[in-house]
Image (cartoon, rainbow, N blue to C red):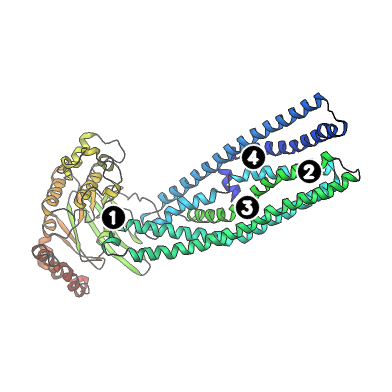
């Protein structure tokens, strides 16, 4: 994992390691300086009562020089280690987002939004936490090797005693890393679950409050939070135990060095400077060894984050992110040939759709609930790739406007002109066609009014009109409206549809419709039953020859007149109609 991350920004990491190495060598040099000052300045002062000024100046100069070099090493290591960590974090996030963009619309339906945010957020952060201490850890390895060589060269017995303690510290680190891997993985998974649940609750805040489900959501979050807390506490206990032993070993090692060193000084086998420098050096080693412990302590957590991020990066695109549809036959705006589609195997939503829509016409898609209307338009737009059959269109990427429009927390202008390069004349023409200009004077800053997150400051109908203007600003050849005018009053909806037909020459509009007045404006109607095209032709012809279609339209008419929900009852009536052989429908 670490090697893969380091390769992303090897230059910055190398500079950080160089700084850590300079610090390590200067630390060993400082121990040698302490030994020299002890033997050449301090001991003579006690033994002889005086010391040469040149010795004092030399000792002071050595200590100051070594201190300056160590400081430079620390600054270089910290600055470039931080740069390495955050550059790698940025790169990982870019890779995750790029992979998200490569995935098709269908893929997003199988992945909770909160989970996707966690992969690009907390998982990427966890994966890079280990990078900052790694250069210091590398420098510490250099320090240990150099220190061992210097101590063995100075005094073999004390050197062997000190070197023998290093494997104990290393084994401690390895043991903790293995023991902590499982709890760290569990902790990261629980964190992702909590993030996903929080995101879902925030997205559904209006539903939760409308139905008084605050207690239910709080209980769901509490359960996940408790699981996360238990995982974190378990990991913290392991870390605390590890820190206890990491502190204890160097402390007892210093006591042992003093005891053995004192005996060797008394026997004349070592000098006081040797013992002082050994204890000083081992004291300096405590913090670097802790840094290695921190690095290895973070490793299980980072591995868990890395595995979750790589799980996304290793997942191949489940299709094409944005399908460029092949050209349709001359004179046709869009053609579906034997198209079938299912979100889940064995549960077809569309079944053998054969459809050819002439260019420049307006077509209404009509059907009962779950007939496949929205799925049909999404397939025709190229957002969903059919499981069987092909789709071709006059426009490589038709413009699709959804029933639930998404607006960014930006100005109205930015939401319509998303690329920022549309001439004002074209922008205002799109706004006028979408009937946005009728409510522009009501906004405090006109086109520059910030509409808030998801367009919260606008009504449902206003949001739909802004989303429609966004699709129209590029003057599409094929416009697909997935019940995109459902929140508009019939008069405004009629103005929009008539304006599209009269003012945009050659545009083809396919709209999911449930209002008789809207259906009547269409040149032709596609009537869907159970995912099949049951009938296709002018509204009057279908109304006269297809009983189930007539019942549905009449139910829509009664609903408009009475508001008693007859359309819902009509759906129940259509259960029998759905069983009629397709051949009996026109």
- Who's the residue at 53% across and 62% down the image? 231
Residue 375 image point, x, y percent: 29, 60
User: Where in the figure is residue 235, as x and y percent of width and height?
Assistant: 57, 59
| Residue 318 visible to the viewer | no
Residue 17's label in the rendered image is: 4
Residue 508, horizontal then vertical, whole percent: 20, 49
Circles 4 and 2, Cβ within 8 Å, touching? The answer is no
Residue of label 2: 278
Instruction: Point out the tag, 2 or 1, that comes first from the N-terminus.
Output: 2
In the image shown, does 260 or 340 lie closer to the viewer? 260
N-term-proximal mark, 3 vs 2: 2
| Disc number placed over residue 296 in the picture, else none | 3
Give the Cα distance between marks 3 and 4. 17 Å
Name the residue furthest top.
54
* Numbered mark located on residue 380 in the image: 1
Tell which residue pokes out farthest to the front in this image.
49
Mark 2 lies on a secondary structure that is helix
Name the foreground residue: 385 vs 35: 35
Nearest to the eye among marks 1 and 4: give it: 4
Where disc 3 sits, the SS reads: helix
Q: Give the mark nearest the N terminus, 1 or 4.
A: 4
């Amino acid at each position: 994992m670490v090697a893969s991350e380091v390769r992303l920004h090897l230059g910055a990491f190398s500079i950080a390691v160089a700084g850590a190495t300079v610090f390590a060598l200067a630390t060993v040099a400082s121990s040698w300086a302490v030994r020299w000052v002890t033997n050449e300045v301090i001991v003579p002062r006690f033994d002889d009562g005086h010391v040469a000024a040149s010795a004092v100046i030399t000792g002071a100069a050595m200590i100051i020089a070594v201190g300056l070099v160590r400081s430079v090493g620390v600054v270089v290591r910290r600055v470039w280690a931080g740069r390495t960590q955050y550059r790698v974090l940025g790169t990982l996030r870019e890779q995750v987002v790029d992979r998200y963009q490569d995935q098709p619309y269908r893929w997003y339906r199988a992945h909770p939004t909160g989970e996707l945010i966690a992969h690009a957020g907390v998982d990427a952060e966890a994966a890079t936490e280990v990078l900052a201490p790694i250069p210091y850890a590398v420098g510490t390895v250099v320090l240990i090797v150099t220190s061992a060589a210097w101590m063995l060269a100075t005094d073999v017995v004390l050197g062997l005693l000190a070197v023998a303690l290093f494997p104990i510290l290393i084994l401690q680190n390895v043991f903790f890393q293995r023991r902590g891997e499982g709890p760290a993985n569990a902790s990261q998974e629980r964190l992702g679950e909590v993030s996903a649940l929080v995101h879902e609750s925030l997205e559904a805040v209006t539903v939760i409050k409308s139905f008084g489900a605050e207690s239910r959501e709080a209980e769901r979050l509490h359960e996940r939070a408790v699981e996360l807390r238990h995982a974190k506490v378990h990991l913290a206990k392991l870390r605390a135990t590890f820190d206890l032993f990491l502190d204890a070993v160097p402390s007892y090692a210093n006591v042992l060095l003093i005891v053995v060193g004192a005996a060797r000084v008394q026997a004349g086998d070592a000098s006081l400077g040797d013992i002082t420098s050994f204890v000083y050096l081992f004291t300096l080693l405590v913090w670097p060894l802790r840094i290695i412990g921190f690095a290895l302590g973070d490793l299980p957590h980072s591995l868990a984050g890395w595995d979750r991020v790589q799980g996304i990066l290793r997942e191949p695109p489940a299709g094409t992110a944005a399908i460029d549809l092949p050209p349709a036959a001359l004179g046709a705006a869009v053609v579906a040939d034997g198209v079938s589609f299912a979100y889940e195997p064995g549960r077809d939503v569309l079944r053998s759709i054969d459809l050819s829509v002439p260019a420049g016409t307006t077509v209404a898609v009509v059907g009962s609930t779950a007939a496949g209307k929205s799925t049909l338009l999404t397939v025709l737009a190229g957002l969903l790739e059919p499981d069987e059959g092909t789709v071709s269109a006059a426009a490589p990427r038709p413009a699709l406007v959804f029933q639930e429009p998404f607006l960014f927390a930006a100005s109205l202008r930015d939401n319509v002109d998303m690329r920022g390069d549309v001439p004002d004349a074209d922008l205002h023409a799109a706004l006028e066609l979408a009937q946005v200009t009728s409510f522009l004077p009501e906004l405090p800053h006109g086109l520059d009014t910030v509409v808030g997150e998801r367009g919260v400051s606008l009504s449902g109908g206003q949001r739909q009109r802004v989303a429609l203007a966004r699709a129209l600003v590029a003057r599409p050849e094929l416009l697909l409206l997935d019940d995109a005018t459902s929140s508009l009053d019939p008069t405004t909806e009629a103005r929009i549809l008539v304006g599209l037909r009269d003012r945009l020459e050659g545009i083809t509009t396919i709209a999911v419709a449930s209002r008789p007045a809207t259906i009547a404006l269409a040149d032709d109607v596609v009537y869907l039953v159970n995912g099949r095209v049951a009938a296709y032709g002018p509204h009057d012809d279908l109304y006269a020859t297809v009983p189930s279609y007539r019942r549905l339209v009449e139910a829509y008419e009664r609903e408009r007149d009475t508001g008693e929900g007859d359309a819902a009852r009509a759906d129940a009536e259509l259960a029998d109609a759905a069983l009629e052989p397709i051949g009996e429908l026109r």
